[in-house]
Image (cartoon, rainbow, N blue to C red):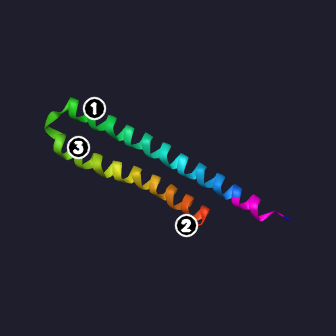
Amino acid sequence: MVDTATVTEFAKLGAGIAIGFGAVGAGLGIGVATKGLMDAVSRQPEVAGKAFGFFLLGAALAEACALYGFVIAAKLVGLF
């Protein structure tokens, strides 16, 4: 039989791992999106406005992954 304190400790460990991977994934995604924007604008400056719109979409989708990690972590520690 598993102790309740052990389950709580493992849930907190899982929450830390979830938010950590979520933050790393979002950081990498936004970095790649920014690199793509800079490459596109440096090659064709006239597409800067359109490329920035696609950059915002990509950055928002990457940030959503971090928010999903946060929600999972919050559920594991019992905030929701």
Mark toward the viewer: 1 or 2: 2
Look at the numbered disc 2 and give the secondary structure of its residue: loop
Q: Residue furthest bottom?
A: 80
Residue occupying the point 38% across, 42% down: 30
The main secondary structure of the magenta stretch is helix
Q: Amino acid at mark 1?
A: Asp
Q: Residue furthest top?
A: 42
Residue occupying the point 56% across, 58% down: 73
Vertical order, 66 against 29 (above or below): below
| Left or right of 1, for residue 16 | left
Q: Are marks 1 and 2 in contact (CB under 8 Å)?
A: no
Marks 1/2: CA–CA distance: 42 Å
Q: Residue furthest front?
A: 5
Density class for disc 3 (Cα within 10 Å; few <14, some 14-19, many ≥20) is: some
Marks 2/3: CA–CA distance: 39 Å
Provide residue 62's location: percent of width, then percent of height. Answer: 41, 50
Label whose residue precedes the other's in the sequence (1 or 3): 1
Q: Amino acid at mark 3?
A: Ala
Disc 3 target residue: 51
Total number of numbered discs in the rendering: 3
Per the rendered image, the range of residues in magenta is: 2-8
Mark toward the viewer: 2 or 3: 2
| Left or right of 69, for residue 4 | right
Disc 2 target residue: 79
User: For the N terminus, which image quadrant?
Assistant: bottom right
User: For the C terminus, which image quadrant?
Assistant: bottom right
Give the numbered dot on residue 50: none
Density class for disc 2 (Cα within 10 Å; few <14, some 14-19, many ≥20) is: few
